Image: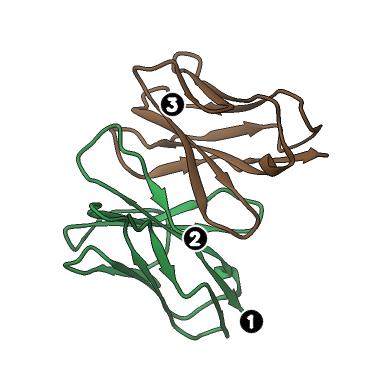
Chain colours: A green, B brown
Amino acid sequence: DAGVTQSPTHLIKTRGQQVTLRCSPKSGHDTVSWYQQALGQGPQFIFQYYEEEERQRGNFPDRFSGHQFPNYSSELNVNALLLGDSALYLCASSLAGRSYNEQFFGPGTRLTVL
Amino acid sequence: KQEVTQIPAALSVPEGENLVLNCSFTDSAIYNLQWFRQDPGKGLTSLLLIQSSQREQTSGRLNASLDKSSGRSTLYIAASQPGDSATYLCAVPTQGGSEKLVFGKGTKLTVNP
């Protein structure tokens, strides 16, 4: 049973560039959430996708956008990169509609913006 | 607005010691609470999920308790080992059964041989 996978593992970009991160959920899961984790901090919720729609959004600017595909995989896009976007980006998957929902996280993508 | 606090921020213990990590949250209207482990630069590994109707969950040497009324959870690690060294994070869903998790900053645990 494959867990949550993310690609790439590491990424280095320069300010102003655009980046796309990818996530495949755990088998059987239909909901994908994205989190940003700065060094020494807990993860911060970016947004969540279900049925190919953005269902919830955290306090992140419109430079952060996403997409969910029919196979439930998801992409996170960040435009006009800033130095402060350097962080570990985590993807989590879950099965919608359960209050006892356990979320499973992927290994993350380390983004460095120079 | 839900806020989660973890104390202490860091903890160093000798191997074999039993230890307790603390997590507190401001809004007691939660559906569940989840404890995670994170190794340096890695993703999160789910350790235990406690439903709001439960008071405890156990997995091996780990035991997590939940007291909703006081807004507290503890993670008890028995007979600690160097391999337990990691950052431990607790998280709760935001109000209304949302799947959006609010995390604490974590407790960095070091177990010395």
Would you say B61 lies left or right of A93 here?
Answer: right
- Residue B27 - label: 3
Residue at x-position 36% and y-position 21%: B52
Q: Nearer the viewer, residue A74 or B101?
A: A74
Would you say A68 lies left or right of A24 here?
Answer: left
In the depicted structure, whether residue B90 falls above or below residue A49: above
Residue at x-position 46% and y-position 41%: B102
Lower position in the chain sequence, tag 2 or tag 1: 2
**What type is the residue that disc 2 sits on?**
Pro
Q: Nearer the viewer, residue B30 or A62?
A: B30
Instruction: Measure the C-alpha gap from mark 1 to mark 3.
Output: 39 Å
**Is the residue marked by circle 2 packed among few (<14), some (14-19), or many (20+) residues within 10 Å?**
many
**What type is the residue that disc 1 sits on?**
Leu
Callout count = 3
Give the SS element for disc 3.
loop
Residues at discs 3 and 2 both on one chain: no
- Residue A114 - label: 1
Q: Label 2: which residue?
A: A107
Would you say A42 lies left or right of B66 here?
Answer: right
> Picture coordinates of residue B78 (x, y %)?
66, 24
In the depicted structure, whether residue A95 falls above or below residue B4: below
Provide the chain ID for the residue under circle 1.
A
Instruction: Measure the C-alpha gap from mark 3 to mark 2.
Output: 29 Å
Residues at discs 1 and 3 both on one chain: no
Would you say A103 lies left or right of B25 here?
Answer: left
> Picture coordinates of residue B43 (x, y %)?
52, 56
**What type is the residue that disc 3 sits on?**
Asp
> Picture coordinates of residue B87 (x, y %)?
64, 44
Provide the chain ID for the residue under circle 2.
A
Q: Mark 2 or mark 1: which is in front?
A: 2
